[in-house]
Amino acid sequence: MNAHVRPADPKKLIKGATGDWEIVIGLEIHAQVTSNAKLFSGSSTAFGGEPNAHVSLIDAAMPGMLPVINEECVRQAVRTGLGLNAQINKRSVFDRKNYFYPDLPQGYQISQYKHPVVGEGEIAVDLSPTEQISVGIERLHLEQDAGKSMHDQHPTMSFVDLNRSGVALMEIVSKPDLRSADEAKAYVSKLRTILRYIGSCDGDMEKGNLRADVNVSVRKPGAPFGTRCEIKNVNSIRFIGQAIEVEARRQIGIIEDGGTIDQETRLYDPGKGETRSLRSKEEAHDYRYFPDPDLLPLEFDDAFVAGLKAQLPELPDAKKGRFIAEYGLSPYDASVLVAERDQADYFEAVAKGRDGKAAANWVINELFGRLNKEGKDVSASPVSAAQLGGLVDLIGEGVISGKIAKDLFEIVWTEGGDPREIVEARGMKQVTDTGAIEKAVDEIIAANPDKVEQVKAKPTMLGWFVGQAMKASGGKANPQALNEILKKKLGIE
């Protein structure tokens, strides 16, 4: 989809002093490749080692050290490209991007410039159950990460930790197709989900394994693109949204005051809720890109790509479509369930051979609700899919009511055990024996003649009788049988 063609959405415009403004956003996502070794060396990529513990002579740029490509990183980039419905380039080239910084020991970063491993693609992003946008992918290229400068370890000196130096990154560049902070947040969430399904990046933003450079510009609806500013290294989805809002309002304020926007690189400060200038924006020629003479062009054949495609898991969009078709779920419920692969697997284990909608209700409302409250994810759930499936069976068979099921869920959550055995052992079955229910109803009617008179004039009073009978049965009376018996005895149609 061409970014210029998408008509402005009035709901997404920002009100300024001189009228409405449209935000135009493009994102560069840096995703750390899931691999045990770095892109061009055998050093470990494990998180949290002692400073400079995972550094080989290659990572430290010692003289005469030559890089050797890690094939697994290439596989991960191609898998990701396939997941983004993108063009896979069977020939790509590694370039040197030259700049000088203390945590870049070579004095250049090995990246890809004109010939990336993955070309154009697109992903579908759900903004709501009824609104979906298509976001174009410009390219995906492989590059090495830099090290880390630490300025808080010594009063007069900075320290450098090269553990991250040479770690493989995929830079995934979107087209300028996003038009609001919410769209950008939804895009990053969807991209993160795809990466996690494929297993090419764990998406852990707290560890810096997924971070975004956010390009923001503003324009009057329908006008050409404005000058953009790039906000570097934003490391949470919430902050991406905040940075866009803050930066768009800053730019609108400057233009409306008669000023112009300088193309520059900025940082977002979440504490102050503002962006601040870092440096003027470099152009590609400032980096003096040239092909890395130590690395041959990267070439592979159709069979390599086909082999990787055959091993891809079912991706979120396909899984969502199948859940809607196979289990009769609403698009919203299906979206919630496929957001994480282990959530989708858990649901499917509960739903197999059962009522899919009932399974989805219990998984989303009861289980996910409780997991969220306790800050756990589904892999740490005290209730297994088999246990929850057993509970859904008991409701379906009429052995327990929905109300009893909630008590049963609580017992399984805190104490564990087989739901059917718990119901037997604790006498939690709902009473479907109409004789026993009739006896309880007769006693209530005999004890409350005044209420019996009232209910004939006001049938909504029936709820009082239902409540009393439920209390008498310890909450175990079958609600349908109880309602029918009461109506019959009280002469209400």
Image (tube, rainbow, N blue to C red):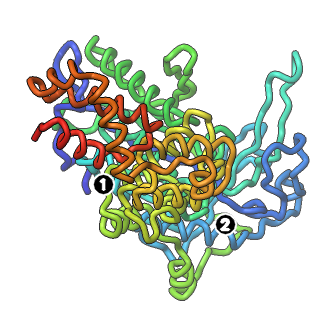
Residue type pointed to by label 2: Cys
**SS class, disc 2:** helix
Say if residue 414 shows up in the picture.
Answer: yes
Q: Residues within 10 Å of mark 1 (few under 14, many from 20)?
A: some
| Residue drawn 22% across the image and 22% down it | 449
Q: Earlier in the sequence, mark 2 or mark 1?
A: 2
> Which of the 4 image quarters holds residue 410?
top right
Image spot of residue 266 (x, y percent): 52, 27
| Residue drawn 20% across the image and 29% down it | 220
Which residue is more in the foreground, 363 or 4? 363
Label for residue 73? 2
Q: Name above or below for residue 401 compared with residue 231.
A: below
Q: Name above or below for residue 441 compared with residue 167.
A: above
Q: Residues within 10 Å of mark 2 (few under 14, many from 20)?
A: many
Residue type pointed to by label 1: Pro
Label for residue 331? 1
| Residue drawn 65% across the image and 38% down it | 206
Image spot of residue 477 (x, y percent): 39, 44
Task: Name, please, the residue furthest toward the front.
Answer: 446
